[in-house]
Image (tube, grey):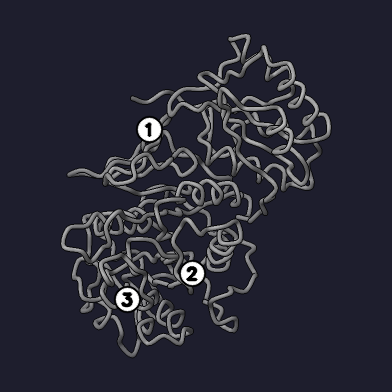
Amino acid sequence: MAGNGSCSLASDFEGKSFSMDPSYRPKKLKTTDTEVKSTDLNYKCESRVLVLYTGGTIGMRIHDGVYTPEPNFLVNELRKLSIFHDQQYVVTHSTPEPNFLVNELRKLSISHDQEWMKSPLCMPLSKEKKNVIYCVYEYEPLLDSCNMTMDDWARIASDIKTYYEDFDGFVILHGTDTMAYTASALSFMFENLGKPIILTGSQIPIFEIRSDGRDNLLGALIMAGNYCIPEVMIFFNNKLLRGNRSTKFDSSSFDAFRSPNFPPLAVLGTKIHVHWDEILTSNTNQKCTLTKLCPSVGILRLFPTITTAMVRQFLAPPLKGMVLESYGAGNAPDSRKDLMQVFSEATKRGVLLLNITQCHRGSVNPGYATGKALKEAGVIQGSDMTPEAALAKLAFVIGREDWNFKDKKEKLAQNLRGELGGFMWY
C-alpha cells in the first residue's frame, strides 16, 4: 500500500467513531493488480493519510498577544499553502469517473457538517512519486496537551481503530508537553500494528513567519504516506523517533524531543535515511486490535529526604502500579530498612513496582547493593525505559485481565514494543 516495506490491512474494527457519521462505511481497498487497474490506473501513485488534529501549538494563532486555539482555522490556512495542498490535482481527479482515493476521501469528509471539510487535501507530488491525499479531522474542543487524560488517549485510539483499514497511515497533531506520554500509550494499546502512526506538533504555530510547524507536518505526512513503518512514532526536527523511546527534552528548542537510549528510526536531510534494521516487524497474520489501559498507576521520584509515611500513602489503594524513579543505575537507600519494608509490603499485596533511573541516559543495573535491595523487595527492573514508556507499559500490563500477577511481572521485564533493552546511542 504505502511506501517501503509491507503493511497488514487486516482489522477487526467495527466500532463507531464518536466523531464520524456512523452510517458511513467506506468501501474496502482494492487488493489485486487487476482490481486496481480496473478502478484507477493511478491508484498505486497515491496514498491516503488520516490527520487527527487534537490541538496544540501547531494550529494556534495569536489573540491579544497569546497563542490561542481557534476552531476551523488550521485546514482553511493549509489550503492556501501550495506545499500542503495541490488544488489542481484534486480538481483534475474529480471527474464523472473520479479517482478512487479522492472520491472515497471526499465521501468521508462530507460526513462532517463543517464547510471546510468538504474535500480532502493533497500534497504535491514528492520525490517518492506519490501524491499523499489527506483528510483532517479537528477535535472539539481543541486541547492543550497538558489537559490530556487517558480518556483522550482512548478517544484517539478509537478513531484510528474505526478507520484503520481505510488509510495507509495516521498523523496526530498534538501539543508537545505530553506528546511522549500519548505516543507511549498508543504504542501499547495497539496490538499487531501494521501501519504508521506519527505524532507531531511544533514550538511555534505553523502560520507564523518563522515556525518549525511546517517542516514537522510536512515530514510527518511524507513519512506516513510513503514509508510503511508499523510503529507509533514522533516526528520532530527532521527526526522520526520511536514513540515509547522519546521524551520532551527542551521546552523552547526546535529540537524538543530526544530518544536517549535508542537511535532515530529515520533522519530527513537532503535524502531520507530510514534505519530499517531498527524497525519493529508486526505479526501481519494477526488482526490489529486495541487494548485498554488501567488508570490506577503513578510515578514516584526518590529524593534524599523522602519519608516512609509519604511513600506508604502514595502506595495506598486504589493504586495498582507505580513507576519508581531511582538514583543512578537504579539505586535506592538500602540503609533505609523502613523504606524497603514499605516496598516489600506493597508488592506482597499485589502492587506492581517498576524501577527506572532518573538519568536521561543509561539503564537500571542491579550490580550495586543499593539496587539489589529494591530487587529483593520485589521491585521489577525497568532497564532503560523512559518515565513515559514505563507508566504506559504499567497501565497496559495491569489492564490485561487475562494475565495473572506472575504473568504481569514477567511481561513488565520483557521487551513488548521496543521500549527497552536497546543500545546506548550518542
Q: Of helix, strand and loop, which one carries label 2?
A: loop
**Gap between marks 3 and 2, in whole Å?**
31 Å
- Tell me the crowding category of disc 1: few under 14, some 14 to 19, or many 20 or more residues within 10 angstroms, Cα based: many
**Picture quarter containing residue 56?**
bottom left
Relative to 269, say whether 359 is above or below: above
* Residue 118 in the figure: left or right of residue 411: left
Residue at mark 1 to residue at mark 3: CA–CA distance = 36 Å
Location of residue 46 in the rendering, given as x and y in whole percent from the top left corner: 33, 66
Query: Residue type at mark 2?
Result: Leu
Mark 2 neighbour density, 10 Å: few (under 14) some (14–19) many (20 or more): some
Per the rendering, the mark at residue 263 is 1
The quadrant of the picture occupied by the N terminus is: bottom left
Question: What residue does disc 2 label?
Answer: 29
Name the residue tied to disc 3: 73
Q: Earlier in the sequence, mark 1 or mark 2?
A: 2
**Of the two numbered discs 3 and 2 in the rendering, the one whose residue sits closer to the viewer:** 3
Work out whether 416 lies above or below 106: above
N-terminal label among 1 and 3: 3
Query: Residue placed at 60% from the left, 60% from the top?
Result: 154
Q: Nearer the viewer, residue 278 or 252?
A: 252
Q: Tell whether label 2 touches label 1 (CB within 8 Å).
A: no
Residue at the extreme bottom: 96
Task: Judge from the rendering whether residue 91 lies leftward or rightward of residue 198; answer left or right.
Answer: left
Give amino acid for label 1: Pro
Relative placement, left or right, of 322 versus 71 is right
